[in-house]
């Protein structure tokens, strides 16, 4: 059993998660069973209650754990499924230590950060690495943060326990380019490595994030000051697609370094074939091009709809198609002239969301897509929006709404799920995780999935109100997927439309570049047909003029 710890230096948002994920991918290619996990030093028990402004997307695992978006990268780059053991925060650690203290488990001892908190952290590392060859653990935050100290201390102790030969520390750091000086600067890296060494950790590998190539002199300097061999100074330069990262890091020899340090060279040589070449080739040589509008309320944030954007890219890979994503602020669509923004789109996607800000704009987007026969794809809230729109404008139930947006609505086409009504706590209390869905034969969903029994991940409190399902169906909305145990609506479609499909779950949590999710693939496929259909007819219209 081997352990890799990934720490970060100088600044946050360096892409430690992607580095860990890409390394995991490279080690899998060598035939190792890999798992990647994340430790976050904040005191929230999980990110489920945090605003997207604070934390970006909440990524949901199969077992219903609400986790950091980096777990999304881990699942997209490697093949194993993760569990709640693989996402740990200080909040969870302290919660567990305090519960033990209340039970009297510490037998009268004074409870302290060392050893009680650090023991708890180490215990979690042992548990979550049980059935794999390599466990990669990313430590959130930046080295030197006060709240991160117990984690780093626990790692030092852990390495002492299992032996330094079985543990590798990779420090991902920033080598900034100073415009005025016209050069890359290594001092911040030296200082953040010094901070690690103060605690007793000597990193084995320094991965340098830099906007310009790291030349031999700089590598030598970092090697000297940070006490690592020159070949262990690895450049992690910016890449145009994140899926190039495994190739870029392989070129820098990162996987060779790790394998050599672990002494696994003989049993795990570099594989002949590297699937990432094919993925990147498809991204870089598209045959088609489409433009998809994503209508949300956090469009200015890079990370709020991370998995959605990635899954759209995967849908592009499946169709050999370049996808331009236009992020549209739902509130802009609440004014009539705003609808012009939807004009040249080949597909409209409404992702998940909470609260009523922007919902009228999203409803306008769903209406536009339905009436103008533009492919529409709704995810979670995007399904609820589509149902409200259909009820209002097709069934003529003018005041149809979701109880979430108007608790007093006379037409609650979207209602709170029964079991949710008695819940008062906000943390980890939604309908979360993987549930089965039975698909109706002959539908768009059946065509995309090519099977009738599927499982998808959920995160919601509200649902289509079954009291309206009859009316919706008579009006031309089709329920193409239900949860067979509880008869909950999971997928809807519109019959008289080229491709209009919305789901109550989050397919974006199960898409990978090498296994694009079937619904994302089908949506982009429909967008390609829309783009092809739109072009000749535009020309024809011009000819007619
Ligand atoms: N707010 C809606 C609900 O709770 C949708 C949730 C979501 O989009 N994830 O049901």
Image (cartoon, rainbow, N blue to C red):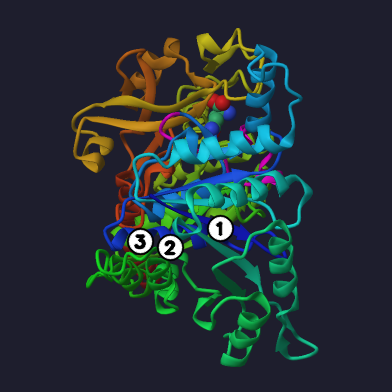
For marks 3 and 1, the one nearer the N-term is 1
Magenta run includes residue 51: yes
Residue range in magenta is 46-63
183 left or right of 286 in image: right
Mark 3 CB in 8 Å range of ligand 1? no
| On screen, residue 233 above or below 524 | below
Disc 2 under 8 Å from ligand 1? The reply is no
Can residue 308 be seen in this snapshot? no
The residue that disc 1 covers is 6
Q: Residues within 10 Å of mark 2 (few under 14, many from 20)?
A: many
In this orientation, which residue lies closer to the viewer: 132 or 518?
132
| Among the 4 quarters of the image, the one containing residue 50 | top right
Q: Look at the picture and state if 511 lies above or below 89.
A: below
Q: Are marks 2 and 3 in contact (CB under 8 Å)?
A: yes
Say what secondary structure mark 1 lies in. Answer: strand
Q: Is residue 401 left or right of residue 115?
A: left
Which residue is labeled 3 in the image?
27
Local crowd at mark 3 within 10 Å, few (<14), some, or many (≥20)? many
Residue at the spot x=59%, y=65% of the render?
A: 203
Q: Position of residue 483 (x, y in %)?
A: 34, 20
Q: Is residue 327 visible?
A: yes
Q: Where residue 163 sits: x, y (%)? A: 49, 54
Residue 479 lies in the magenta stretch: no
Please state the horizontal and vertical placement of residue 364, each as a whole percent of the image.
57, 40
Q: Residue at x 41, y 68 (%)?
A: 246
- What residue is pinned by disc 2? 23
Q: Secondary structure at mark 3?
A: helix
The answer to whether the residue labelled 1 contacts the one labelled 2, judged by CB atoms less than 8 Å apart, is yes
Dividing the picture into quadrants, the one containing residue 95 is top right
> Camera-side residue: 273 or 126?
126
């Amino acid at each position: 059993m081997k352990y890799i710890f990934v720490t970060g230096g100088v600044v946050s948002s360096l892409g430690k998660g992607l580095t860990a994920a890409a390394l995991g991918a490279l080690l899998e290619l060598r035939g190792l069973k890999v798992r990647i996990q994340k430790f976050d030093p904040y005191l929230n028990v999980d990110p489920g209650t945090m605003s997207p402004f604070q934390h970006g997307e909440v990524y949901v695992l199969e077992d219903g754990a609400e986790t950091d978006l980096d777990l999304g990268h881990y699942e997209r780059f490697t093949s194993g499924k993760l569990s709640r053991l693989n996402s740990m925060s200080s909040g969870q650690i302290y919660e567990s230590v305090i519960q033990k203290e209340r039970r009297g488990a510490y037998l009268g001892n004074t409870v302290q950060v060392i050893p009680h908190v650090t023991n708890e952290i180490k215990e979690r590392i042992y548990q979550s690495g049980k059935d794999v060859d390599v466990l990669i653990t990313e430590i959130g935050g930046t080295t030197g943060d006060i709240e991160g100290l117990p984690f780093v201390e626990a790692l030092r102790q852990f390495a002492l326990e299992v032996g330094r030969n079985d543990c590798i520390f990779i420090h991902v750091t920033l080598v900034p380019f100073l415009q005025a000086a016209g050069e890359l600067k290594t001092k911040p890296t030296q200082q953040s490595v010094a901070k690690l060494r103060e605690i007793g950790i000597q990193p084995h590998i320094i991965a340098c994030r830099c906007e310009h190539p790291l030349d031999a002199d700089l590598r030598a300097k970092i090697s000297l000051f940070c006490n690592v061999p020159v070949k262990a100074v690895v450049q992690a330069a910016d890449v145009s697609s994140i899926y190039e990262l495994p190739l870029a890091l392989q070129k820098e020899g990162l996987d060779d370094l790790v394998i050599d340090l672990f002494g696994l060279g003989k049993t795990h040589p570099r594989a002949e074939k590297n699937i990432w070449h094919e993925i990147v080739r498809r991204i870089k040589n598209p045959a088609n091009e489409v433009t998809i509008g994503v209508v949300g309320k956090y469009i200015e944030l890079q990370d709020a709809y991370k998995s959605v954007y990635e899954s759209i890219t995967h849908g592009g890979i499946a169709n050999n198609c370049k996808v331009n994503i236009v992020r549209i602020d739902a509130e802009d669509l609440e004014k009539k002239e705003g609808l012009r923004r939807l004009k040249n789109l080949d597909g409209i996607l409404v992702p998940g969301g909470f609260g009523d800000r922007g919902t009228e704009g999203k409803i306008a987007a769903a209406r536009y897509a339905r009436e103008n026969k533009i492919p529409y794809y709704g995810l979670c809230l995007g399904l609820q929006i589509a149902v409200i729109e259909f009820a209002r404008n097709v069934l003529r139930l003018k005041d149809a709404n979701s109880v979430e947006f108007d608790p007093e609505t006379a037409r609650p086409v979207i209602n709170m799920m029964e079991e949710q009504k008695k819940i008062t706590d906000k943390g980890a209390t939604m309908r979360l995780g993987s549930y089965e869905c039975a698909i109706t034969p002959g539908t768009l969903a059946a065509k995309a999935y090519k099977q009738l029994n599927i499982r998808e991940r959920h995160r919601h409190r509200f649902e289509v109100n079954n009291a309206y399902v009859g009316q919706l169906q008579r009006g031309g909305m089709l329920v193409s997927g239900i949860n067979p145990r509880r008869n909950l609506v999971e997928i809807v479609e519109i019959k008289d439309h080229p491709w209009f499909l919305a789901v109550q779950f989050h397919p974006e949590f199960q898409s990978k570049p090498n296994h694009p999710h079937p619904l994302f693939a089908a949506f982009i496929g429909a967008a390609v047909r829309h783009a092809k259909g739109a072009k000749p007819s535009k020309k024809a219209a011009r000819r007619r003029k």
